[in-house]
Amino acid sequence: DVVLTYSSWLPWTHPVNTAIYIPWMEGIEAASEGRITFKRLPKPVASPPAHLDAVRTGQADVAFAVHGYSRNQFTPYIFGEFPFLGDSAKASSIAFQRTHDKFLSEMDLYKGVHLIGVNLHGPGQVHHSKMNMTKPADFEGQKIRTGGPVPLAIVEAWGGVSIRQPAPKSYEILSSGIADGITFPFESLPSFKITELVPYTTTMPGGWYNSSHYLVMNKRAYDGLTDEDKAVVDQFSGEAYAALAGGGWDEINAIGLEAANAAGNSIVEASEELKTALSELNDTFVADYIKEAEGFGLNGQEVIDYFKAEAEKAGSM
Amino acid sequence: MIEALTGLAVLLILAFLRIPIAIVMILVGTAGMAWVLNPEGALYNVGQTAYDAAINYELSVVPLFVLMGNLVARAGLAGQLYTASNAFLGHRKGGLAMATVVACGGFSAICGSSLATAATMSKVAMPSMRRFNYSDRLATGSIAAGGTLGILIPPSVILVIYGILTQQSIGKLFAAGVIPGLLGVLLYLAAVRFVTWRRPEEGPAGERTDWSERMRALGQVWGVILLFAIVMGGIYGGVFSPTEAAGIGAMGAFAFALLRRALTWSILKDILLESVETTAMLFTVLIGALLFANFINYTDFPQALLAFAAQFADRPWLVIMAILAIYVLLGCVFESLSMILLTVPIFFPLVRDLGYDPIWFGIVVVVVTEISLITPPVGLNVFVLRGVLPDVSTGTIFKGVTPFWVADIFRLALIVAIPALSLWLPSFVV
Amino acid sequence: MDLSHNQPVAGNVRGLGAASAVLSWIACIVLFGMMLVTFADVVGRYVFLSPLPAAYEMISLMMPAIIFCAMPITVLREGHVTVDLLDSFMSRGTARIQGVVVNIVSACALGLLAWRLGVKARDDYVYETITDELLLLIWPVGAAMVVLCAIAALAALANAWAYATNPPLHKAS
Ligand code: NA
Ligand code: NA
């Protein structure tokens, strides 16, 4: 029998763990009839960005991480942070996995680890303490806590001030007024206890931005499994993983939205002016991506088009 | 279970053989991980842990609060605090020792470290207590004990580290430390009272100061009040985060030192040098403690402990009592930072699962850490005084500290029994 | 916190004393700079509505400079916290042997850190790890940490050598 150590840089009680990764582990434990069990380490073995290394070097057997943490290594995935990727994390995650399978799986980007699957966290939105955003100029002088380069680029392009603080500090910086607003998927409002602090959400159809994640397993641990056990893990990999993770995100984003509604927050869809302005910014993101993807021998436009088409398909299933 | 206990035993043995605690924790932590996990993963974890501990924005509060403490120590603020409290208390029996305690409390409001508080106050308070024939025991005891308040009354390096370890709001932790800190001042005053009641010769009365002189002396402490107001007001007013507050506080202390013409190039160099050396030392301890905690993380010990404590879910105070007993024992041997770093990751989940307030537990942990600073054989505040006053023996200081130690135990009991003492003020912090 | 201003044990070992003094000055300058950066960041945020660009990252990267540049001098001064419970029972000869052993053990631990930080820096070089905001390659920072940590390990060895060849003067109290 095999015991796999799992290291999580989010607390075990975090919705991402309870809705996605714990069910994923329990699924494997059940399907393997107890031959595979997971040891959930009480505390993460390293900082969040170091989790890929931790799995590669055997500090933990399994962990999830964010592509954006290893930007140079995962450049081809960076379009997974763009605006307008879709309102359903499940559909977009499945499309993201298929895009990986078609264009990126042969590129050996996950050196030394076994990839279980990739997913997106669903639409990121703009939450503010005092107002709904109606036009780009509303961002002027606003101090917005951002994570990742896309929200940062949006805030700075429109004259806002991007605040760089770790996500767990969100409550502190919003309650004290160090930041006026924040960019997050809905899930994070209740999980960081900030639903009441940012009563104004401006939603963007398809998301202001997104974030792509992946689940990996130590290569030696995977290779050491019996064929039967490998088959069990494989059964919870690829599109099956993407559907589980994306579906989980949809679920917890819905809970976050519900919490915001229950708190009486003002949730308003972005104006046409904002959509147009963001779409213009998005064109520059895409252009940059196409240029960067060339370095990897990829046709970036083709990658994005394929993703969009698959997201459409998966969404209508 | 066996692995963790073996590791702890080896850790203690090596520490007693006088190998620096940081070094012991690095080696035992690594060996332990190699044993429980696998050698390759263990070795990679060493590099990663050292790297993560060093390249760390949040931990920048540590060197900056240390720098702030060392700057205010030289800015002459401590002397004014002492003059003012002496003007009010000095004429009483044991008055100079009382003034020392009060001045320590005041200095703690602008200095985040107990060692710096004790070191600074000893330079200010010791000469006049000597002049009035105070016994070395009472004089050094009041300084060593008063100095411990540095990590409870905000700002506090130790509270910041607790906040980072447990993801609790540093603003709330700072607010929570205020009342227990003031309680500490009151109980230390009572301890001085007790000593001079039993043996009046230990603390003769000093000179009486008239009211106009008292007011004048009080007017001189505006610097301390302003600096405290800037740092705390900035945090609670939402001007800057507690992390940034350390930098702002250091800058404020620097400005003060400049205004008071207390800085020369060579003094500034000394202050910075002292601060970076302390920082390097603290981070070596931090890296060691993290490695040891990572080793424990790979063992079954945390789960076993949780399962064990779960049996007492209906009598959770038993678990708290056990934890306190362990802390007071560990406090004999460990210095403040390694004690917090080693124990909080193990005890915190336990205490939280039993339904106790994490902010309250933070204050409890800091108070037991304060106690450890004056508990023999390794009481860092006592060692600091030894360094400043080479003619007083360690034994004398430890004897002098005893009544204050008793006051501390009483205070600990109060804080444990009445959580509102810690939790009332933070309830006003959003 | 002048806990431990013992006189340098091995400060006179060929250039090691001078090197650690220079490094500790660098640490001092960086610490002072970190204070200014934090201040400028906060002031910039309110007065100019623009915080210092990448202050967060600058501070993160200044931290290892302070810690590791100051490490050799703390080792030379034997500034680390120890349990000296058994000291009074020790003869001069025993204390000397202990000084040698403790410093060799310390050198091993610091050497271990240097080695593993080196492996980490090599991985960061191979995987071209970059920072979040300024998109800088991170491996040179790791490499600097390796060199500084190795100097600290050498300092511990020099201490051991000093104990082995001289009576421990600073223990005379
Ligand atoms: Na303090
Ligand atoms: Na102690």
Image (cartoon, rainbow, N blue to C red):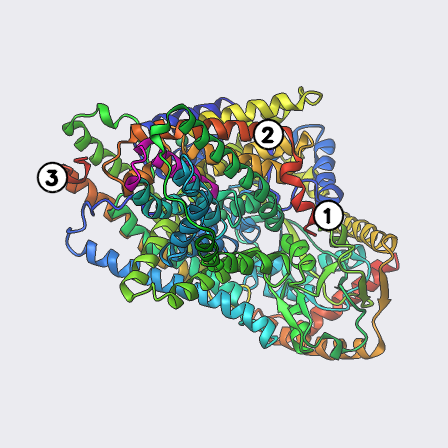
**Residue at (34% x, 63% y) in the render:** B262
Task: Say which quadrant the N terminus of chain A sits in.
Answer: top right
| Residue B71, position as x, y percentages in the image | 39, 58
Give the image quarter of residue B390: top left
| Residue C9, position as x, y percentages in the image | 19, 45
Residue carrying label 2? B414
Residue type at mark 3 is Asn
Residue type at mark 2 is Leu
Helix, strand or loop under label 3: loop
Q: CA gap, disc 3 to disc 2? A: 53 Å
Residue carrying label 3? C166
> Few, some or many C-alpha atoms within 10 Å of disc 2 (few <14, some 14-19, many ≥20)?
some
Residue A241 image label: 1
Q: CA gap, disc 1 to disc 2? A: 53 Å
**Residue at (71% x, 63% y) in the render:** A183
Residue type at mark 1 is Tyr
**In the image, is residue C46 above or below residue B91?**
below
Kindly report which numbered mark, 3 or 1, lies closer to the viewer in this rendering. Answer: 3
Task: Say which quadrant the C terminus of chain A sits in.
Answer: bottom right
In the image, are marks 1 and 2 on the same chain? no
Helix, strand or loop under label 2: helix
Establish whether ligand 1 lies closer than 8 Å to the Cβ of label 1.
Answer: no
| Residue A122, position as x, y percentages in the image | 76, 58
The boundaries of the magenta stretch are B130-149
Residue B62 or B428: which is nearer the viewer? B428
> Few, some or many C-alpha atoms within 10 Å of disc 1 (few <14, some 14-19, many ≥20)?
many
